[in-house]
Image (cartoon, grey):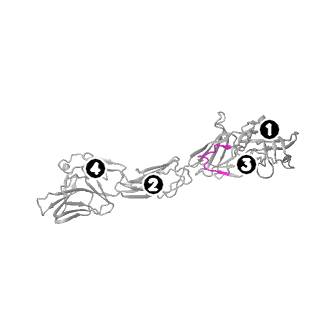
Amino acid sequence: MHMMKKYPFLLLLLAVVPAAAQAQLSAPTADATVATTSLSNPARQETIYVFFDDTPAALTATAADTSTFIWTRLNVAGVRLDTVGRDDSVTVSSLHDLPEGGYRVTVYHLIDTAAPVDTFTTWVFRDTFHVTGITFRNSCEELELTMSSSPSIYTAYLFYNIDDYLRDSTLAGENTLHGNNTAGVEWSADRDIHEGVDEPDAFWQSPQRYGIVRITDPPPMHDARYSVTVTDLFGKSSSYTMTETIPAIAVYAKITAKEIAADGHEIPMDDIEASPPSDAEALFRVRFSQEKCLNAQRFLWKGFGDINQPFTRNVVFWSDSTSNSAAPWVAPRMPYKGGWVDGYTPGSYVVRLTVRNPATGCIDSTEIRAIGVKPSSFNANAIPNAFTPNGDNDNDLFRFVNGQEPVSMEYIKVSVFSRSGALVYRYEGRADAWDGWNGKNNNTGSDLADGLYYYILSGEGWDGQMYNSAEYKGALHIFR
């Protein structure tokens, strides 16, 4: 009796194999049918008929011939079988409104009294499983949800051989624990708790084997009410929905960015955290934003120096902090020639954003590693030695060969002289702003005569590299 009280799902399984197949035992109203499993004798199996909640519990025995049916029920306390029903001269016999327990029906064939006695043993089990609540533990790192139920989904079966037990009630049964043996525990929320998150934790909504789930990496980012549906060992489903809303207290850091082109127009950069530019050209002007961060009220930006340089990789060259989630875009500034420039010079840089919710103390951070800006290059072979400014839109300009323009140059100088040494053209400024020379005197006057001219190129890269050697001087021909 002590065992029976300890396990609400305790099933004493009666082990007698039917002697003949002329009679049958069934439970037409049963919601589920399962077989027992004996650890010491796997071949010994009996049937458990499972009835959900208030489903009427009944057993029906049938025989091919007119028979007498005697029904008995195991009395564990009295160590005996109590007679609970009898039908004479019938082919069908039933018991109704049955309590849980072990039952045996013995069938006596009246037409052929020499026929063997058919005996069936089975168990009636009442499945009253229901989910009764959800408790939670909410932290910056995770939301833990725990389901409570009545009775527990942990089910123990205690196996007995009924005849051995009736001879000696001190014999121990075979106790095997089928813990967590459920068809599935599924969790859900009344909204998308990871809306706005790049890589949400979707595993928490997958069918679980346990009555507890942890939502992490990241935790929920939006307030929500949670539900759970459990399917127990016998296929019965029970659901529960919280009445209270669990607040989202964790924060989520997300960096968005846009490049500022030379002409000032903005170029959105897709997922700069996952795919930072590796071959940007100086001066690389970029703006960062915290507009897609979640649940944060404090924002701290840090921009570190070139990670390839041992003296600058851990140096914070720029920083910004704000308490406004809708603050203007943050622009990096880098030291250059004793001053500062708005943008990145050649190198590889790290940007880190740390966000905080002062009310909860939750912190999150993310970083871009690394933004690569190419070193300067100025290919002397990119300058042609002849051009034909005749207006046919073919080689009309003296300019860099397409695809070989200077890279990461702070400025360039282009000077063209006649054979007599007179300056006929000059440009000084950004390399990407040079449109080329059209063959006119100072680019605006009259056409210059065909013939030989001389050019001198020079420049300085954003990395301090100077380009002014002899290879950047040469002859130039005009043909019309």
Q: Is residue 345 above or below residue 244?
A: above
The kind of residue on which mark 4 rests is: Thr
Residue at horizontal 81 percent and vertical 51 percent from the top: 390
**Side (left or right) of 259 relative to 204:** right
Please determine whether, in this image, residue 249 is positioned above or below residue 473: below
CA separation in Å, label 4 and label 2: 31 Å
Q: Secondary structure at mark 4?
A: loop
Magenta residues, start to end: 267-280
Q: Position of residue 475 (x, y in %)?
A: 81, 39
Tell me which label, 1 or 3, sits earlier in the chain: 3
* Residue 262: mark in rendering: 3
Q: Mainly helix, strand or loop, the magenta region?
A: loop
| Separation (CA) of disc 1 from disc 4 | 96 Å
Give the left or right position of residue 210, taking residue 191 as reference. left
Q: Position of residue 359 (x, y in %)?
A: 57, 49
Q: Which residue is mark 2?
A: 187
Residue in the foreground of this view, choosing between 392 and 357: 392
Residue type, mark 3 in image: Ala
Query: Which of pointers 3 and 2 lies earlier in the amino acid sequence?
Result: 2
Q: Secondary structure at mark 3?
A: loop
Residue 199 x/y as whole percent = 54, 49
Q: Which residue is the site of mark 4?
A: 37
Nearest to the eye among marks 1 and 4: give it.
Answer: 1
What is the number of the mark on residue 350?
none
Mark 2 is surrounded, within 10 Å at the Cα level, by few (under 14), some (14 to 19) or many (20 or more) other residues, namely many
Residue 474: give its label.
1
Q: Local crowd at mark 1 within 10 Å, few (<14), some, or many (≥20)?
A: some
Residue depth check, mark 3 versus mark 2: number of the one nearer the observer: 3
Q: Is residue 288 visible?
A: yes
- Assess whether residue 273 is covered by the magenta stretch: yes
